[in-house]
Image: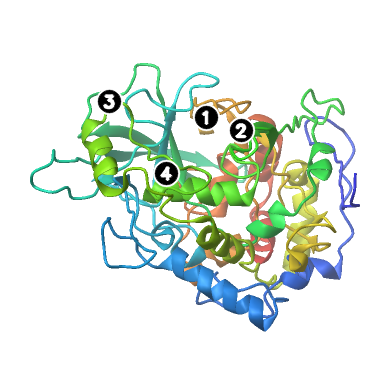
Protein backbone atom coordinates (compact mmCIF):
# COMPACT_ATOMS: atom_id res chain seq x y z
CA UNK A 1 0.00 0.00 0.00
CA UNK A 2 1.15 3.53 -0.78
CA UNK A 3 -0.53 5.09 2.21
CA UNK A 4 -0.92 4.00 5.77
CA UNK A 5 -4.50 3.98 6.91
CA UNK A 6 -6.34 3.02 10.03
CA UNK A 7 -7.43 -0.56 9.56
CA UNK A 8 -9.47 -2.48 12.06
CA UNK A 9 -9.78 -6.20 11.40
CA UNK A 10 -12.37 -7.44 13.86
CA UNK A 11 -14.47 -10.55 14.31
CA UNK A 12 -18.23 -10.55 13.85
CA UNK A 13 -20.26 -11.70 16.81
CA UNK A 14 -21.24 -14.86 14.99
CA UNK A 15 -17.70 -15.86 14.09
CA UNK A 16 -15.60 -15.33 17.21
CA UNK A 17 -16.14 -15.84 20.88
CA UNK A 18 -13.94 -12.96 22.02
CA UNK A 19 -15.13 -9.38 22.09
CA UNK A 20 -13.93 -7.32 19.09
CA UNK A 21 -11.30 -4.69 19.76
CA UNK A 22 -12.51 -1.10 19.96
CA UNK A 23 -10.38 1.41 18.06
CA UNK A 24 -8.92 4.00 20.44
CA UNK A 25 -10.68 7.34 20.07
CA UNK A 26 -8.71 10.02 18.23
CA UNK A 27 -9.38 13.75 18.18
CA UNK A 28 -9.04 13.77 14.40
CA UNK A 29 -12.39 11.95 14.31
CA UNK A 30 -13.94 15.32 15.12
CA UNK A 31 -12.96 16.57 11.65
CA UNK A 32 -13.91 13.67 9.36
CA UNK A 33 -12.71 15.38 6.19
CA UNK A 34 -9.31 16.33 7.60
CA UNK A 35 -8.34 19.93 6.87
CA UNK A 36 -10.96 19.95 4.09
CA UNK A 37 -13.72 19.67 6.75
CA UNK A 38 -16.11 22.61 6.96
CA UNK A 39 -14.96 24.98 9.72
CA UNK A 40 -18.25 24.86 11.64
CA UNK A 41 -21.62 23.18 11.39
CA UNK A 42 -24.07 24.77 8.95
CA UNK A 43 -27.63 23.51 8.93
CA UNK A 44 -28.81 25.49 5.88
CA UNK A 45 -27.26 23.25 3.20
CA UNK A 46 -24.67 20.53 2.66
CA UNK A 47 -23.12 22.50 -0.20
CA UNK A 48 -20.07 24.34 1.09
CA UNK A 49 -16.53 24.47 -0.32
CA UNK A 50 -13.77 22.47 1.34
CA UNK A 51 -12.50 24.26 4.43
CA UNK A 52 -8.96 24.56 3.05
CA UNK A 53 -9.67 26.07 -0.40
CA UNK A 54 -7.99 29.31 -1.45
CA UNK A 55 -10.12 32.33 -2.39
CA UNK A 56 -9.46 31.72 -6.10
CA UNK A 57 -10.47 28.08 -5.81
CA UNK A 58 -13.61 29.05 -3.94
CA UNK A 59 -14.57 31.23 -6.92
CA UNK A 60 -14.19 28.20 -9.20
CA UNK A 61 -16.29 26.18 -6.75
CA UNK A 62 -19.16 28.67 -6.90
CA UNK A 63 -18.87 28.85 -10.68
CA UNK A 64 -19.22 25.07 -10.87
CA UNK A 65 -22.21 25.20 -8.54
CA UNK A 66 -24.22 27.03 -11.21
CA UNK A 67 -24.12 23.91 -13.42
CA UNK A 68 -25.33 21.84 -10.48
CA UNK A 69 -28.06 24.26 -9.42
CA UNK A 70 -29.54 25.87 -12.52
CA UNK A 71 -32.13 24.06 -14.67
CA UNK A 72 -31.21 22.92 -18.17
CA UNK A 73 -33.55 23.73 -21.06
CA UNK A 74 -34.32 21.98 -24.34
CA UNK A 75 -32.33 22.95 -27.43
CA UNK A 76 -32.27 25.23 -29.30
CA UNK A 77 -32.50 28.06 -26.78
CA UNK A 78 -31.07 31.50 -26.14
CA UNK A 79 -29.71 30.27 -22.79
CA UNK A 80 -25.94 30.09 -23.12
CA UNK A 81 -24.34 26.84 -21.88
CA UNK A 82 -27.63 25.61 -20.41
CA UNK A 83 -29.41 23.99 -23.35
CA UNK A 84 -29.42 20.35 -24.36
CA UNK A 85 -32.00 18.90 -21.98
CA UNK A 86 -33.23 15.43 -22.95
CA UNK A 87 -34.74 14.31 -25.28
CA UNK A 88 -35.53 11.89 -22.43
CA UNK A 89 -34.61 12.73 -18.87
CA UNK A 90 -35.38 12.32 -15.16
CA UNK A 91 -34.68 15.83 -13.90
CA UNK A 92 -33.72 19.26 -15.25
CA UNK A 93 -30.91 19.86 -12.78
CA UNK A 94 -28.61 18.03 -10.37
CA UNK A 95 -30.20 19.98 -7.52
CA UNK A 96 -33.60 18.43 -8.27
CA UNK A 97 -32.27 15.01 -7.22
CA UNK A 98 -29.70 16.05 -4.61
CA UNK A 99 -31.61 18.61 -2.59
CA UNK A 100 -29.19 20.96 -0.77
CA UNK A 101 -26.43 18.49 -1.59
CA UNK A 102 -28.16 15.72 0.31
CA UNK A 103 -30.76 13.15 -0.65
CA UNK A 104 -33.84 14.16 -2.59
CA UNK A 105 -37.39 13.91 -1.37
CA UNK A 106 -38.75 10.37 -1.65
CA UNK A 107 -41.67 9.65 -3.94
CA UNK A 108 -45.07 9.26 -2.30
CA UNK A 109 -47.17 6.14 -2.66
CA UNK A 110 -49.15 5.86 -5.88
CA UNK A 111 -48.33 6.73 -9.48
CA UNK A 112 -45.69 9.40 -10.04
CA UNK A 113 -42.71 10.51 -12.12
CA UNK A 114 -40.10 10.77 -9.35
CA UNK A 115 -36.84 12.64 -9.76
CA UNK A 116 -34.81 11.58 -6.71
CA UNK A 117 -35.80 7.92 -7.14
CA UNK A 118 -34.37 6.47 -10.35
CA UNK A 119 -34.79 3.01 -11.81
CA UNK A 120 -31.89 1.16 -13.41
CA UNK A 121 -32.75 -1.59 -15.89
CA UNK A 122 -30.90 -4.64 -17.12
CA UNK A 123 -30.42 -8.39 -16.98
CA UNK A 124 -27.58 -10.88 -17.03
CA UNK A 125 -23.93 -10.32 -16.20
CA UNK A 126 -23.15 -7.87 -19.01
CA UNK A 127 -26.63 -6.75 -20.06
CA UNK A 128 -26.70 -3.42 -18.26
CA UNK A 129 -29.72 -2.22 -20.22
CA UNK A 130 -33.20 -3.21 -21.28
CA UNK A 131 -33.45 -3.85 -25.02
CA UNK A 132 -36.27 -1.30 -25.40
CA UNK A 133 -35.76 1.31 -22.67
CA UNK A 134 -32.01 1.25 -22.12
CA UNK A 135 -30.13 1.36 -18.84
CA UNK A 136 -32.45 3.71 -16.98
CA UNK A 137 -36.16 4.47 -17.10
CA UNK A 138 -36.62 8.14 -17.96
CA UNK A 139 -39.87 9.62 -16.76
CA UNK A 140 -39.86 12.93 -18.65
CA UNK A 141 -39.51 14.00 -22.29
CA UNK A 142 -39.03 17.34 -24.03
CA UNK A 143 -41.78 18.88 -26.14
CA UNK A 144 -41.28 18.25 -29.85
CA UNK A 145 -42.35 20.53 -32.74
CA UNK A 146 -45.93 20.04 -33.87
CA UNK A 147 -44.83 18.69 -37.24
CA UNK A 148 -42.64 16.00 -35.64
CA UNK A 149 -43.71 12.76 -33.96
CA UNK A 150 -44.69 13.34 -30.33
CA UNK A 151 -42.03 12.15 -27.88
CA UNK A 152 -43.49 10.51 -24.77
CA UNK A 153 -41.82 9.89 -21.45
CA UNK A 154 -40.87 6.25 -21.07
CA UNK A 155 -43.19 5.58 -18.17
CA UNK A 156 -44.15 6.18 -14.56
CA UNK A 157 -43.80 4.37 -11.24
CA UNK A 158 -46.54 2.95 -9.07
CA UNK A 159 -45.10 2.69 -5.54
CA UNK A 160 -46.84 0.85 -2.71
CA UNK A 161 -45.53 -0.03 0.75
CA UNK A 162 -46.09 -3.20 2.71
CA UNK A 163 -45.76 -2.67 6.47
CA UNK A 164 -43.85 -5.30 8.42
CA UNK A 165 -44.21 -5.48 12.20
CA UNK A 166 -41.47 -6.75 14.52
CA UNK A 167 -39.99 -6.26 17.94
CA UNK A 168 -36.64 -5.98 19.66
CA UNK A 169 -35.59 -8.61 22.16
CA UNK A 170 -36.71 -6.35 25.01
CA UNK A 171 -40.24 -6.29 23.56
CA UNK A 172 -40.15 -2.80 22.04
CA UNK A 173 -42.05 -2.83 18.72
CA UNK A 174 -40.89 -1.54 15.35
CA UNK A 175 -42.40 -1.24 11.89
CA UNK A 176 -40.52 -1.59 8.62
CA UNK A 177 -41.87 -0.65 5.23
CA UNK A 178 -41.15 -2.82 2.21
CA UNK A 179 -41.59 -1.09 -1.16
CA UNK A 180 -43.29 -2.69 -4.14
CA UNK A 181 -42.74 -1.08 -7.54
CA UNK A 182 -44.67 -1.47 -10.76
CA UNK A 183 -43.99 0.35 -14.01
CA UNK A 184 -47.08 1.91 -15.58
CA UNK A 185 -47.89 3.96 -18.69
CA UNK A 186 -44.92 2.50 -20.55
CA UNK A 187 -44.68 4.27 -23.91
CA UNK A 188 -42.83 1.52 -25.80
CA UNK A 189 -44.58 -1.56 -24.50
CA UNK A 190 -43.39 -3.94 -21.77
CA UNK A 191 -39.82 -4.46 -20.61
CA UNK A 192 -37.95 -7.55 -21.75
CA UNK A 193 -39.12 -10.57 -19.78
CA UNK A 194 -35.76 -10.97 -18.02
CA UNK A 195 -35.16 -7.29 -17.20
CA UNK A 196 -34.64 -6.50 -13.52
CA UNK A 197 -35.91 -3.24 -12.05
CA UNK A 198 -33.49 -1.63 -9.58
CA UNK A 199 -34.52 1.49 -7.62
CA UNK A 200 -31.78 3.99 -6.76
CA UNK A 201 -32.48 6.81 -4.30
CA UNK A 202 -30.21 9.78 -5.02
CA UNK A 203 -27.35 9.84 -2.47
CA UNK A 204 -25.80 12.76 -0.60
CA UNK A 205 -22.86 14.20 -2.55
CA UNK A 206 -20.56 15.78 0.05
CA UNK A 207 -17.10 14.30 0.59
CA UNK A 208 -17.02 12.55 -2.79
CA UNK A 209 -13.67 14.05 -3.76
CA UNK A 210 -12.13 12.59 -0.61
CA UNK A 211 -13.54 9.16 -1.47
CA UNK A 212 -12.08 9.53 -4.96
CA UNK A 213 -8.70 10.33 -3.38
CA UNK A 214 -8.44 7.02 -1.48
CA UNK A 215 -5.66 4.91 -2.98
CA UNK A 216 -7.02 1.87 -4.83
CA UNK A 217 -4.28 -0.19 -3.18
CA UNK A 218 -5.66 0.68 0.24
CA UNK A 219 -9.10 -0.51 -0.85
CA UNK A 220 -7.84 -3.70 -2.47
CA UNK A 221 -6.03 -4.48 0.80
CA UNK A 222 -9.48 -4.85 2.40
CA UNK A 223 -10.74 -7.30 -0.22
CA UNK A 224 -11.50 -10.72 1.23
CA UNK A 225 -13.77 -12.32 -1.35
CA UNK A 226 -13.59 -15.83 0.11
CA UNK A 227 -13.57 -14.76 3.77
CA UNK A 228 -10.04 -16.01 4.44
CA UNK A 229 -10.08 -14.52 7.94
CA UNK A 230 -13.42 -16.26 8.68
CA UNK A 231 -15.08 -13.21 10.15
CA UNK A 232 -18.24 -13.59 8.09
CA UNK A 233 -17.40 -10.58 5.87
CA UNK A 234 -16.50 -11.11 2.20
CA UNK A 235 -15.58 -7.65 0.94
CA UNK A 236 -14.94 -7.49 -2.78
CA UNK A 237 -14.75 -4.75 -5.38
CA UNK A 238 -16.42 -4.36 -8.70
CA UNK A 239 -14.17 -4.10 -11.76
CA UNK A 240 -15.68 -1.66 -14.21
CA UNK A 241 -14.52 0.07 -17.41
CA UNK A 242 -13.02 3.53 -17.44
CA UNK A 243 -14.92 4.83 -20.48
CA UNK A 244 -12.06 7.13 -21.53
CA UNK A 245 -9.31 4.48 -21.44
CA UNK A 246 -11.26 1.25 -21.82
CA UNK A 247 -9.33 -0.24 -18.90
CA UNK A 248 -11.04 -2.13 -16.07
CA UNK A 249 -10.62 -0.37 -12.73
CA UNK A 250 -11.91 -0.66 -9.18
CA UNK A 251 -15.53 0.51 -8.98
CA UNK A 252 -16.02 2.94 -6.11
CA UNK A 253 -19.04 5.13 -7.05
CA UNK A 254 -22.65 4.15 -7.52
CA UNK A 255 -24.77 1.82 -5.43
CA UNK A 256 -23.10 -1.22 -6.97
CA UNK A 257 -19.72 0.35 -7.72
CA UNK A 258 -20.53 1.04 -11.38
CA UNK A 259 -18.00 3.86 -11.93
CA UNK A 260 -14.26 3.96 -11.16
CA UNK A 261 -13.89 7.68 -10.46
CA UNK A 262 -15.86 10.76 -9.55
CA UNK A 263 -15.53 12.41 -12.95
CA UNK A 264 -17.13 9.47 -14.74
CA UNK A 265 -19.88 9.27 -12.13
CA UNK A 266 -20.76 12.93 -12.74
CA UNK A 267 -20.65 12.51 -16.52
CA UNK A 268 -22.94 9.48 -16.24
CA UNK A 269 -25.45 11.50 -14.22
CA UNK A 270 -25.44 14.23 -16.87
CA UNK A 271 -26.29 11.84 -19.70
CA UNK A 272 -28.65 9.46 -17.89
CA UNK A 273 -30.47 11.83 -15.53
CA UNK A 274 -30.59 15.08 -17.54
CA UNK A 275 -29.86 13.94 -21.09
CA UNK A 276 -26.74 16.08 -21.47
CA UNK A 277 -24.15 14.55 -23.79
CA UNK A 278 -20.54 15.03 -22.73
CA UNK A 279 -17.00 13.90 -23.60
CA UNK A 280 -17.41 10.72 -21.52
CA UNK A 281 -20.82 9.81 -22.95
CA UNK A 282 -21.21 11.60 -26.30
CA UNK A 283 -24.35 9.78 -27.52
CA UNK A 284 -27.95 10.34 -26.46
CA UNK A 285 -29.67 7.55 -24.53
CA UNK A 286 -32.26 6.93 -27.26
CA UNK A 287 -32.55 3.22 -28.05
CA UNK A 288 -32.70 1.93 -31.65
CA UNK A 289 -36.46 1.34 -31.41
CA UNK A 290 -37.22 4.83 -30.04
CA UNK A 291 -37.73 6.59 -33.36
CA UNK A 292 -39.23 9.81 -31.96
CA UNK A 293 -36.31 10.18 -29.54
CA UNK A 294 -33.75 9.56 -32.30
CA UNK A 295 -35.44 12.06 -34.60
CA UNK A 296 -35.51 14.74 -31.90
CA UNK A 297 -31.84 14.18 -31.07
CA UNK A 298 -30.91 14.51 -34.74
CA UNK A 299 -33.08 17.61 -35.19
CA UNK A 300 -31.55 19.43 -32.25
CA UNK A 301 -27.83 18.90 -32.67
CA UNK A 302 -27.09 16.37 -35.41
CA UNK A 303 -23.36 15.82 -35.33
CA UNK A 304 -22.45 18.77 -33.12
CA UNK A 305 -20.06 18.46 -30.16
CA UNK A 306 -21.22 17.34 -26.69
CA UNK A 307 -23.78 19.56 -24.99
CA UNK A 308 -21.48 20.19 -22.05
CA UNK A 309 -17.85 20.53 -23.21
CA UNK A 310 -14.92 19.26 -21.19
CA UNK A 311 -14.04 22.73 -19.88
CA UNK A 312 -17.44 23.22 -18.24
CA UNK A 313 -17.60 19.60 -17.15
CA UNK A 314 -14.27 20.03 -15.36
CA UNK A 315 -15.65 23.06 -13.52
CA UNK A 316 -18.61 20.99 -12.36
CA UNK A 317 -16.28 18.17 -11.34
CA UNK A 318 -14.11 20.57 -9.33
CA UNK A 319 -17.12 21.84 -7.42
CA UNK A 320 -18.43 18.31 -6.79
CA UNK A 321 -15.06 17.09 -5.54
CA UNK A 322 -14.77 19.93 -3.04
CA UNK A 323 -18.17 19.78 -1.31
CA UNK A 324 -17.08 19.76 2.31
CA UNK A 325 -17.87 17.19 4.95
CA UNK A 326 -19.30 18.84 8.06
CA UNK A 327 -17.60 18.43 11.44
CA UNK A 328 -18.98 15.92 13.92
CA UNK A 329 -21.38 17.18 16.53
CA UNK A 330 -21.38 15.79 20.10
CA UNK A 331 -18.95 12.98 19.48
CA UNK A 332 -17.10 13.61 22.75
CA UNK A 333 -20.23 13.16 24.85
CA UNK A 334 -20.54 10.09 27.11
CA UNK A 335 -23.57 8.80 25.21
CA UNK A 336 -21.80 9.08 21.85
CA UNK A 337 -18.70 7.37 23.23
CA UNK A 338 -20.84 4.55 24.59
CA UNK A 339 -22.46 4.20 21.18
CA UNK A 340 -19.05 4.24 19.49
CA UNK A 341 -17.94 1.30 21.64
CA UNK A 342 -21.11 -0.60 20.73
CA UNK A 343 -20.50 0.14 17.02
CA UNK A 344 -17.22 -1.77 17.22
CA UNK A 345 -18.52 -4.49 19.50
CA UNK A 346 -21.33 -5.26 17.06
CA UNK A 347 -18.82 -5.56 14.22
CA UNK A 348 -20.25 -2.69 12.18
CA UNK A 349 -16.74 -1.61 11.18
CA UNK A 350 -16.39 -4.88 9.24
CA UNK A 351 -18.06 -3.10 6.31
CA UNK A 352 -18.23 0.51 7.51
CA UNK A 353 -14.44 0.93 7.54
CA UNK A 354 -13.89 3.96 9.77
CA UNK A 355 -10.84 5.71 8.35
CA UNK A 356 -8.36 6.14 5.51
CA UNK A 357 -5.55 8.47 4.56
CA UNK A 358 -6.04 9.88 1.06
CA UNK A 359 -3.28 9.65 -1.56
CA UNK A 360 -0.45 12.15 -1.22
CA UNK A 361 -0.28 12.45 -5.02
CA UNK A 362 -4.00 13.08 -5.60
CA UNK A 363 -4.55 15.64 -8.37
CA UNK A 364 -6.52 18.03 -6.14
CA UNK A 365 -3.95 19.03 -3.50
CA UNK A 366 -6.42 20.19 -0.85
CA UNK A 367 -7.83 16.66 -0.73
CA UNK A 368 -4.46 14.88 -0.69
CA UNK A 369 -2.90 13.35 2.41
CA UNK A 370 -6.01 13.82 4.56
CA UNK A 371 -7.05 11.54 7.43
CA UNK A 372 -10.74 10.97 6.72
CA UNK A 373 -13.55 9.14 8.51
CA UNK A 374 -16.19 8.10 5.95
CA UNK A 375 -17.18 4.82 7.65
CA UNK A 376 -17.22 2.85 4.40
CA UNK A 377 -14.92 0.39 2.66
CA UNK A 378 -16.63 1.22 -0.68
CA UNK A 379 -16.76 -2.54 -1.25
CA UNK A 380 -19.56 -4.83 -2.36
CA UNK A 381 -21.28 -6.92 0.30
CA UNK A 382 -24.11 -9.42 0.23
CA UNK A 383 -26.89 -7.66 2.14
CA UNK A 384 -29.35 -10.53 2.11
CA UNK A 385 -32.56 -11.32 0.30
CA UNK A 386 -34.52 -8.54 1.99
CA UNK A 387 -32.53 -5.85 0.16
CA UNK A 388 -31.83 -7.82 -3.03
CA UNK A 389 -32.89 -6.30 -6.34
CA UNK A 390 -31.77 -9.17 -8.58
CA UNK A 391 -29.84 -6.84 -10.89
CA UNK A 392 -26.28 -7.73 -11.87
CA UNK A 393 -23.78 -4.97 -12.70
CA UNK A 394 -20.47 -6.47 -13.80
CA UNK A 395 -19.21 -8.38 -10.72
CA UNK A 396 -21.94 -7.05 -8.43
CA UNK A 397 -24.67 -9.62 -7.90
CA UNK A 398 -28.35 -9.06 -7.32
CA UNK A 399 -27.81 -9.29 -3.54
CA UNK A 400 -24.74 -7.04 -3.31
CA UNK A 401 -24.49 -3.33 -2.57
CA UNK A 402 -21.58 -0.99 -2.07
CA UNK A 403 -21.19 0.05 1.57
CA UNK A 404 -22.71 3.49 2.02
CA UNK A 405 -20.57 6.12 3.82
CA UNK A 406 -22.05 7.12 7.17
CA UNK A 407 -20.47 10.54 7.72
CA UNK A 408 -23.04 13.31 8.08
CA UNK A 409 -26.14 11.09 8.06
CA UNK A 410 -27.41 12.60 11.30
CA UNK A 411 -27.69 16.02 9.65
CA UNK A 412 -30.32 14.97 7.11
CA UNK A 413 -33.40 16.01 9.13
CA UNK A 414 -31.75 19.23 10.33
CA UNK A 415 -30.70 20.40 6.87
CA UNK A 416 -33.38 18.90 4.66
CA UNK A 417 -36.35 18.50 6.97
CA UNK A 418 -36.68 14.79 6.14
CA UNK A 419 -34.50 11.70 5.97
CA UNK A 420 -34.30 8.43 4.09
CA UNK A 421 -31.80 5.57 4.07
CA UNK A 422 -30.70 2.54 2.03
CA UNK A 423 -30.50 2.28 -1.75
CA UNK A 424 -34.23 2.86 -2.27
CA UNK A 425 -35.06 5.13 0.68
CA UNK A 426 -37.32 2.58 2.33
CA UNK A 427 -35.82 3.17 5.79
CA UNK A 428 -37.27 6.25 7.49
CA UNK A 429 -34.78 6.15 10.35
CA UNK A 430 -31.26 4.89 10.99
CA UNK A 431 -32.75 2.20 13.21
CA UNK A 432 -34.91 0.91 10.35
CA UNK A 433 -31.87 0.88 8.06
CA UNK A 434 -29.97 -1.34 10.51
CA UNK A 435 -32.96 -3.65 10.88
CA UNK A 436 -33.00 -4.24 7.11
CA UNK A 437 -29.38 -5.46 7.15
CA UNK A 438 -29.02 -9.13 6.28
CA UNK A 439 -26.51 -11.40 4.59
CA UNK A 440 -23.00 -10.54 5.78
CA UNK A 441 -24.44 -7.94 8.17
CA UNK A 442 -26.98 -10.28 9.78
CA UNK A 443 -24.88 -10.90 12.90
CA UNK A 444 -24.54 -7.15 13.54
CA UNK A 445 -28.25 -6.68 12.93
CA UNK A 446 -29.11 -9.41 15.41
CA UNK A 447 -26.74 -7.85 17.93
CA UNK A 448 -28.59 -4.54 17.51
CA UNK A 449 -31.96 -6.23 18.04
CA UNK A 450 -30.61 -7.81 21.25
CA UNK A 451 -29.45 -4.51 22.79
CA UNK A 452 -31.48 -3.00 25.61
CA UNK A 453 -33.22 0.27 24.79
CA UNK A 454 -30.62 2.58 26.37
CA UNK A 455 -27.79 0.94 24.42
CA UNK A 456 -29.73 1.10 21.15
CA UNK A 457 -30.25 4.78 21.83
CA UNK A 458 -26.53 5.28 22.47
CA UNK A 459 -25.54 3.54 19.22
CA UNK A 460 -28.01 5.61 17.21
CA UNK A 461 -26.85 8.79 18.95
CA UNK A 462 -23.25 8.01 17.94
CA UNK A 463 -24.28 7.48 14.31
CA UNK A 464 -26.14 10.79 14.33
CA UNK A 465 -22.97 12.63 15.46
CA UNK A 466 -20.36 11.30 13.01
**Disc 2/disc 3 C-alpha distance (Å):** 36 Å
Q: Residue at the location (61% across, 28% down)?
A: 396
What residue did someone put label 2 on? 383
Between 76 and 105, the one lying in front of the other is: 76
Q: Is residue 94 left or right of residue 57?
A: left
* Between discs 3 and 1, the one toward the N terminus: 3
* Between discs 1 and 2, the one toward the N terminus: 2
In the displayed structure, 421 sits above or below 366; it is above
Residue reaching furthest to the front: 303
Total labels drawn: 4
Q: Would you call the spot at circle 2 few (<14 residues within 10 Å), some (14-19), or many (20 or more)?
A: many
Q: Split into 4 quadrants, where in the image is the C terminus?
A: bottom right
Question: Mark 4 and 1 residues: CB-CB less than 8 Å, in contact?
Answer: no
In the displayed structure, 338 sits above or below 249; it is below
What residue did someone put label 3 on? 289
| Protein image colouring | rainbow
In the displayed structure, 320 sits above or below 248; it is below
What residue did someone put label 4 on? 272
Q: Is residue 142 left or right of residue 243?
A: left
Q: Would you call the spot at circle 3 few (<14 residues within 10 Å), some (14-19), or many (20 or more)?
A: few
Amino acid sequence: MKNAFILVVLCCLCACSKQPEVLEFSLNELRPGGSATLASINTRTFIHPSGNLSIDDELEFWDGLSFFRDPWVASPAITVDRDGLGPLYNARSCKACHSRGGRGRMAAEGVSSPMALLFRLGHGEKQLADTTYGAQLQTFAVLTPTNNPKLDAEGQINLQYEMIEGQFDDGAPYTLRKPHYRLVNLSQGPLAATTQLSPRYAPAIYGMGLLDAIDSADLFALEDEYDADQNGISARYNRVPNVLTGQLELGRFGFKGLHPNLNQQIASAFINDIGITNPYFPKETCQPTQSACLLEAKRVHGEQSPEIPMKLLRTTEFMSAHIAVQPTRKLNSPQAQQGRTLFYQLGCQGCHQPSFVTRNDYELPELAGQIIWPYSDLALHDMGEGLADGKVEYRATGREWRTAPLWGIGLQPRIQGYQGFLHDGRARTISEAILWHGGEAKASQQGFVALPAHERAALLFFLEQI
